[in-house]
Image (cartoon, rainbow, N blue to C red):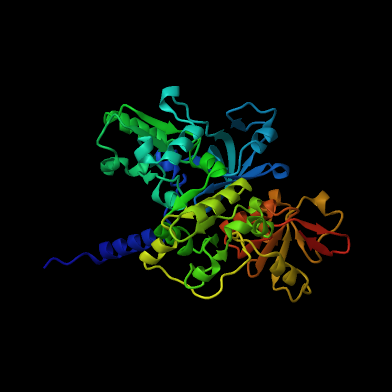
Amino acid sequence: MKTLNPCILSLACATALIAADTPAPRPNAAKICTTCHTTASDHLRGHFDNFIANSNSFQLRVDERTEVLRFDKATVKVITPEPAANVDAAFKGIAKGHEVRVQFTEKDGVKTATVVAVKPPVKLAANETITLPEVQKLVAMGPEKGKYFLFDSRPAPRFMEGAIPTAVNLPFPAFDKNVDRLPADKTALVIFYCSGKTCNMSPGSLTKAKALGYTNAKVFIDGMPAWAKRNFGVMSPTSMKTAYLDTNTPLVILDARPAAEAAKGFVKGAVSADPTKMAELLRTFPAAKLKPPVVVVDATGGEAARAVATEFVKAGYVGVNLLTGGFKAWQAAALPLETGTLATRAVFVPKPRPGSISPAEFTKIAELSIADRGAVILDVRNTDETRNGSIKGALLIPEPQLLARLSEIARDRKVLCYCATGTRAELAYHLLKEKGYDVRFLPAEITIIDTGEFTID
């Protein structure tokens, strides 16, 4: 038997260990962007998050990761569908969550954006599109009477969060593997939709359908965002369990059945929602601006649930869905049940942003003596903002100076960041976390007086 050279064996082992310890390169594009685009190494594709004017920076979400980017107002190019008066106006005009492409340079770990391109609306010929009123009319009739086939081109996880009634999920990324979901009649009205005016998945589905010979295929360009503002959606029991319950994603479940019937069995956490007492329920309901996902349940997904859902949509709630098949479908799927008395008041606490600390916990630590805190309280406001006061013992390092002054921040203690509104504190959180600090941030407005006393809104 041939024996391996010990030197070669040692080198191979060392190489394997180095490879194992080398972190995998982080993706430079959100998963949904990779469906339609490839992205160069000096570019990022993701969803616009926060703009911080007084530090010439912004945050970009790339799936679960947040990138912090600087920019120079004199040189950055911001490309928007509509011209803006100046750089600040262009940034302020980018909606939170809108898809953008960023070209950047990097020096000493700092990314500086040179181009920020906002994804423009999709453009299709008039005969290739269908409007919201037209889709509403068809859905009200149903596929058999309306003679249409409606397909949701979004990936399955998005479909599970709520879809237009009567839609079938045909994800664009898996279109070619699921063409059997299309109708056999290639002259039938086939409608595709996805995530709104800038989403390319439904137009991509249209192109593929036409290549297969479908002659009456159209795109509802405004998609799910427009539908959700004016109508309720639907989700199956399995979808609700997978998208919300299994992930501990906050939502409000409204049970529209009579209280006596519901007491015999209901979905855990459900709140009683009497269709005849909507005004009373809405008065105490979490504010629409919090955007609480709402799922309405009755016995079979019928009139009672539709009545409740309709009232919530009228009241300005977005993301209201009916449970398809109602409570009976939930039972049939053998999903968990509770018995007893339903809650009468809905509570919704939005899922906290990664790295955030609650006002109560922050206050508890900040009110301790400096020696007892066990943490660095870091004020990342600009110097002129601290003239009226700063928390006693807080370390002041304006956020734009943070990376240059890391040596001033103890690495063996927790770091709690705050600013005036929480925006720059979150920026500081991401910068320090990237450098290995144990850090959190206060996601709230704070007012501080010259004595160091503070209130958090």
- Residue shown at the point (77%, 50%) measured from the top left: 382
User: Could you tell me residue 153's position as x and y percent?
Assistant: 39, 41
Placement of 183 over or under 25, stated as above or below = above
Relative image position of residue 119 (x, y in whole percent): 52, 34
Left or right, 234 with respect to 415, comes to left
Side of 87 where 295 appears, left or right? left
**Residue 344: percent from left, percent from top:** 62, 67
The C terminus - image quarter: bottom right
Horizontal side of residue 206 vs 372, given as left or right: left
> 272 or 454: nearer the eye?
272
Whether residue 237 is visible: yes
- Considering depth in this image, is 371 or 344 the residue closer to the camera? 344
Q: In the picture shown, does residue 220 fall above or below 408?
A: above
Residue 342, percent from left and from top: 56, 70
Find the residue positioned furthest to the right. 450
> How many numbered tags mark residues here?
0
Dividing the picture into quarters, in which one does residue 174 lie?
Answer: top left
Quadrant of the rendering where the N terminus is positioned: bottom left
What residue lies at 77% left-to-right and 74% top-to-bottom? 368
Residue shown at 53%/76% (left/top)? 340
Camera sees residue 108: no
The residue nearer to you, when weighing 65 against 56, is 65
Between residue 39 and residue 1, name the one nearer to us. Answer: 39
For the point 26% across and 64% down, the residue is 9
